[in-house]
Image: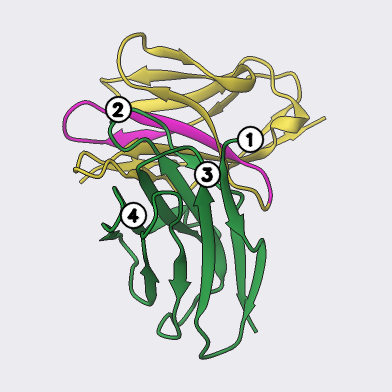
Amino acid sequence: DGGITQSPKYLFRKEGQNVTLSCEQNLNHDAMYWYRQDPGQGLRLIYYSQIVNDFQKGDIAEGYSVSREKKESFPLTVTSAQKNPTAFYLCASRPGQYQNTEAFFGQGTRLTVV
Amino acid sequence: AQSVAQPEDQVKVAEGNPLTVKCTYSVSGNPYLFWYVQYPNRGLQFLLKYITGDNLVKGSYGFEAEFNKSQTSFHLKKPSALVSDSALYFCAVRDGGGYNKLIFGAGTRLAVHP
């Protein structure tokens, strides 16, 4: 089946730790995105990437980092600099060359600081 | 800057009644608009989009949306609500920048009661 796979589904982080959230897609999409979801705030864009080895900061990039070494993979690292990382994280992808196409979303990773 | 607003945090309807979830937008140029649905602890599922053409757009699960340029609105509708329609609904607009990222509203929680 084609789609986007996020792992793990649940993740617990201790204070001061870096953690990495995985996002893999087999849709052959060029563009990939990371969003953070908090109650009542909708989705806020963290980072996005149009092609391999290229990525751009979104609206709330501080305390996060990404890489795009392969077309199908766009991992997100939540660093210790992110002071309030507890949230639901969503990865998405879309065919980058078509402006009017919808984005496809993974099932999300819920990160909790313990 | 592109933006969308969902003026209602929550909408409650009785099963079998019509439902409307409101969305207004602010864009420069032609709007590309989307509706997504989210069930608890899941990713977003695409419902429908407006790119150009007919103002009434039909989508998945019996949903439709009406594009109104003069009122800058893109309200989601369904003639007869089901209890299983209860979920969180997001309106989104494509950002006109080169990366075509989606900008989301804060979401509206739809509750359909028997």
Q: Earlier in the sequence, mark 3 or mark 4?
A: 4
Q: Which residue lies under the disc numbered 2?
A: B72
> Outermost residue, top direction?
B54
- Label 2 is placed on what type of residue? Thr
Disc 1 from disc 2: Cα separation: 38 Å
- Label 3 is placed on what type of residue? Phe
Residue A66 as seen in the image, left or right of residue A37 = left
Q: Which residue lies under the disc numbered 1?
A: A1
| Residue B109: quarter of image | top right
Q: Is residue B12 above or below residue A81?
A: above
Q: Which residues are magenta?
A: B23-40
Q: Position of residue A113 (x, y in %)?
A: 60, 80
Disc 4 from disc 1: Cα separation: 24 Å
Q: Nearer the viewer, mark 3 or mark 1?
A: 1
Q: Position of residue A103 (x, y in %)?
A: 44, 38
Q: Earlier in the sequence, mark 4 or mark 1?
A: 1
Q: Residue at x 37, y 71 (%)?
A: A65
Q: Nearer the viewer, mark 1 or mark 2?
A: 1
Q: Is residue B22 above or below residue B51?
A: below
> Disc 4 on helix, strand or loop?
strand
> Disc 2 on helix, strand or loop?
loop
Shown colour of chain B: yellow
Q: Residue at x 59, y 47 (%)?
A: B43
> Outermost residue, front direction?
A70
> Disc 3 on helix, strand or loop?
strand
- The chain ID associated with circle 2 is B
